[in-house]
Image (cartoon, helix red, strand yellow):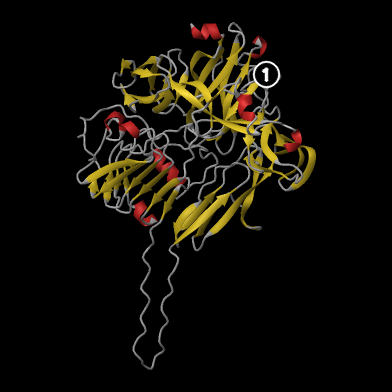
Amino acid sequence: MTRIRHAVPAVLMALLCFAALCLPGMADDNSCGDGVTWSYSDGTLTISGTGAMADYDSASKLPWADVRREMTAIVVENGVTYIGSHAFCNGVSVAEITLPSTLTAIGSQAFPDTGTDEDTSFRGITFTGTRAQWNAITIASGNTALTDFVSDGYLTCTGVEATPTPTPTPTPSPTPTPSPSPSSQTEVLITVSNTVGAALEGGGRYAVGETVTLSAPAVDGFAFAGWYAGDTCVSESAVYSFEAAEDAAFTARYTSVGTIPLRVIGTSFTVNGTAYANQFEGSFPAGTQITVSFTDETQSFVRWATEDLRLTESTAVSYTFPLVLDRTLRAVSSADDLGAVVTLLSETGRVLWTGAWDEDVGFPVTPSRSGYRFDHWVLQGTDTKVTVNTMADYLTQSASVTLTPVFTRRDTQYTVSVFCNGEADTTQGGAVQVGTVLAVTAPETAGGKAFSCWQDANGIVLSYRRCFRFAAQGDMTLYAVYADETAAAEPVIAVTGVTTETVDSKNKIIWSVTRSVPEGYNVLAQGILRTKTPSLGTADTLVMDAAGTAAPGITVRTDTSTAREGEFLYSLTVADVNTEYYLRGFVMVSDGSVTRVYYSPVSRGTFNTFKN
């Protein structure tokens, strides 16, 4: 049964983690099993042949280890019967996977349970067999992400179920000639939706005649109003069961108990279909899907931006999003007389900023990449370096310029030490390069006690997951803590590293904020709170209210990823190396009934103190 979740990672959640053990090295040919080979071309890793793939225990021993971070697609061709353990470790950019109908088993941690903050959009898994064949595959433990993706509706089965052969027309006889039996639909698609961000269950593909059970959870601030097929209420109960007969769509309706404010500015636009001019101010139930559309036909639309024009929310004329935080949107058009427009993209093509070029201000944003130092901007599609001093030359040739970043790998190395139940685990951690993504795994039990959580050297809880994934941004000592009883898993967010760098005479502080959210929670928003006002920098004052608004003097920055695990790199250019800053991470989650915000401890320091 497929579960439709609200917090599907916007960005690819690569189904992969780092293994800790090692096998002897493979041969230097393209073999990856008895009768099975591999090839790599243009970002696609292809597994071909007949039979089973080999098992692997270490990412570094994979035959395709050198390209595992670059590949964007995995294709396992028909004939392959088994995917080996850890086969696709560390494919952090994989966006699509194709699996064959001949597949009968998947080894342990072939698709381990991790999350990612990469900008890659995961498109799904294609299985060339039927859903019945997929259900018959033996999937070993440690493949939680794979099963989650299937549950979240990312699996497409392209095989066709066998249908009965039509009954042939009998030879003439006194009895009537029977008509051929029509081909019947053997699988139906049940879709579920809502407008409040609830984690609905029950949507997916079912065999005809199979029992479907739809479940709508309680949502903080809302009351359940019923399951609807179109405008017809089919059940007033939050749990609704029926027999699958044909494709159908159901909506879980809720009525509002609480609201969140929204403000929109622009010459002419609509909010959820209602027309407005100049400005709109209103409130909606938390989680409501909002669609804003620019409608001024006398102007050319540019982008939807934050009120201060610093960040671009969308470049689409119509922009849809769930309202979970108090926000203001500004529709930027040719009426704003922006003059020469500059667009800054991330390494993966996401718009970081679009706006009028101001030579006195220069580049208003600096891109970040874990383990790398930003070097310079180049014209999109070229190697031509662009600086503040040379920008005017390109703007005289075109009314708009689009730039992409160039990064340099940072050479800094850190040491990660791992202890399980007080004893050093030398099979994990070690010397790693800055930005390297690691996954440390704790045994379920040790010394007769159950795993409780991961903590750092200061006793701060980092994760309740046995497999904890993070990016190395400094020397770290991790402790797997054990107790008589397993601790209740809760969302955790922590500042796991602070680094500094100076580029083009600009001093920057870079915080690494890592979150680890257990299953059963949906991530609605995550980011950081920052201030340089001491009275606002305490654990009691550096917070947000229920609408996601912070006190004046506190800066709120959010990240787009809603993956349950991942890292948010926040970079701040500072004018004074001795100014003290206070920063903490936050993650807003819902368990289907209550929405809560969890905070990290406050990180406090100056550029100089963090540097030293």
Q: Residue at x 48, y 52 (%)?
A: 204
Q: Position of residue 213 (x, y in %)?
A: 50, 53
Q: Is residue 506 left or right of residue 184?
A: right
Which quadrant of the structure image shows residue 587?
A: top right
Residue kind at label 1, given as amino acid type: Asp
Q: Residue at x 44, y 26 (%)?
A: 464
Q: Position of residue 68 (x, y in %)?
A: 35, 34
Q: Is residue 113 left or right of residue 230?
A: left
Which quadrant of the structure image shows residue 206?
A: bottom left
Pick out the residue farthest to the bottom: 174
Tell which of 141 and 341 is nearer to you.
341
Q: Is residue 362 left or right of residue 418?
A: right
Report the number of discs. Answer: 1
**Residue 370 shows up from this direction:** no
Tell which of 410 and 172 is nearer to you.
410
Relative to residue 451, is residue 283 depicted above or below?
below
**Residue 167 shows up from this direction:** yes
Q: Which residue is mark 1?
A: 360
Pick out the residue farthest to the right: 277
What SS does tag 1 mark?
loop
Q: Residues within 10 Å of mark 1 (few under 14, many from 20)?
A: few
Q: Position of residue 305 (x, y in %)?
A: 67, 33
